[in-house]
Image (spheres, rainbow, N blue to C red):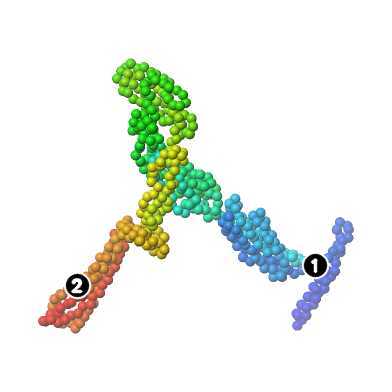
Amino acid sequence: MRTIKEAVVLLSLLLILIQVIQLGIVFSLTGAASTGTVGLCYNHAPTFLNLSNHTVAHNFEYVRTITFNDTNGDAVAIFDNTSLFSIINTTGVINFTPTISQVANYSILVTLRDYNSSCPLEASEVFVLSINNSIPQLSTIIPNQTWEEDVSLSGLDLDNYFTDYETDSVIYTVRYGSNVRVSIASPSNLVTIRPDRDFSGTSWMLFTANDTLGSVTSNNVSLNITAVANYCGDSACNADESCTSCSTDCGTCPASSSSSSGGGGGGTRIIEKIINNTGGCADSYQCYEWSPQSCDVGNQERRCIWVEKSCTVTKTIETRPCKCIPNIVCSVWDPEVCSPDQTQIRTCNDIHNCGAPVRLSTQKECLFDALNQSSGIFSNANSPLPGIVGAAYANLIPRLWSEYKSQGSYLVLVLLLCAVIVWWFYHKRYCLTIERIPLPIEEYTLEIETIVQTASLHRLRIRTQFRCSLNSTKGKYRKVIR
């Protein structure tokens, strides 16, 4: 009892002391007298509720609300130390869309400050905000291209093959092999391929997509330029043509070495004549290509060398009015993947508008692969059945055979063979004669287990049970296996 009394007395004295302190304290500072009031308060600082780290992709909206708890129920203001965004002080809401230039990891200090009038308190924590970038992706394989020589190919849109998750602006570059020139138009990102004059054969090209922070390279695209027969009038003086066999492409041969004519309308101008008396020369005439290669107004020139049988060598410059040389440009075959109607089309135009007919096919047949098409006969109920079913069944058996053969597996053939064996055992009767055995066996079960190993290392286990009966016939048992 005494202990309790002492505790009550001490508590009373403490309360009296607190009241005295609250009434006022007089103290001296640098010789002058001052008065003030010292108060004691009771408060708890606000606390965060799961301020975890976050990751966001740039160009995507980032929304977050800072959650907290204040046990005293005081109003709380929220502050941050970053320039990325401005947090709403009263609600703690963060809402902004980071850009590609802000891709990095940020340590953000968030502070909670309550509005207790007696003694305000605050609390701070750090969370990491990671702003990421995804490099462009090759979403679709760029198909190989095949077209004719002396024809440019256009219409390949790179935006159909590359994607960027954050929809960044993508810069495309290209590398390519010999005998072709590949260019990318901006901002359409359309590709134009120009093979060298009279070139036929194969080349290649590779594309790279870059969003300034990362890049991806395409598959190697094979370019197959097929040869076409040269003909007089194709605006090219080919190796098997000359001024005598095809003046349309190679120009008119000069009348003689001593003749010359000038003027802008066309003709031959002798620039050098060399007399060689060694004898035994052959009559020959060779010229360089016309320059400029194509023009609308003015003249074209070319240099020629004429060696006569008398060994007189004449170097001339020939001129002619500008002649329009066709520049054929064809689009890629559409659709790139053969459709059920088994037809692809393209457009071919002479961008120089020379007026000569374009002797190229704009439509061709293709082979529709029903097994690899998501819009094939099994998923498109509205398709014209005769055309699709015919195309599908025409490729079904060769496709299955090529698939299993290419994988080194003949599992289908093995299963068919096993089915035939089982049928044979169940429908063919065997009778075997054995000696009488004094055992009370009326029937038993014979189990045969066969393991077949295929070329692709698959193991197929076949287990077959036969129920057999023992019948007494003339002092012997006949075992009948079905």
Residue at mark 2? 428
| Residue 204 figure quarter | top left
Q: Residue at coordinates 48% horizontally, 30% vertically from top-left?
A: 298
**From what the image shows, is residue 28 above or below residue 208?**
below
Please report whichever mark, 2 or 1, sits nearer to the chain's N-terminal start: 1
Question: Label 2 crowding class (10 Å Cα cut-off): few <14, some 14-19, many 20+?
Answer: few
The kind of residue tagged 2 is: Lys
Q: Is residue 381 visible?
A: yes
**From what the image shows, is residue 10 above or below residue 254?**
below
Residue at mark 1? 39
Image quadrant for the N terminus? bottom right
Question: Label 1 crowding class (10 Å Cα cut-off): few <14, some 14-19, many 20+?
Answer: few
Q: Residue furthest toward the top?
A: 277
Please state the horizontal and vertical placement of residue 27, each as a whole percent of the image: 86, 62
Q: Residue furthest toward the left?
A: 474
Q: Nearer the viewer, residue 213 or 279?
A: 279
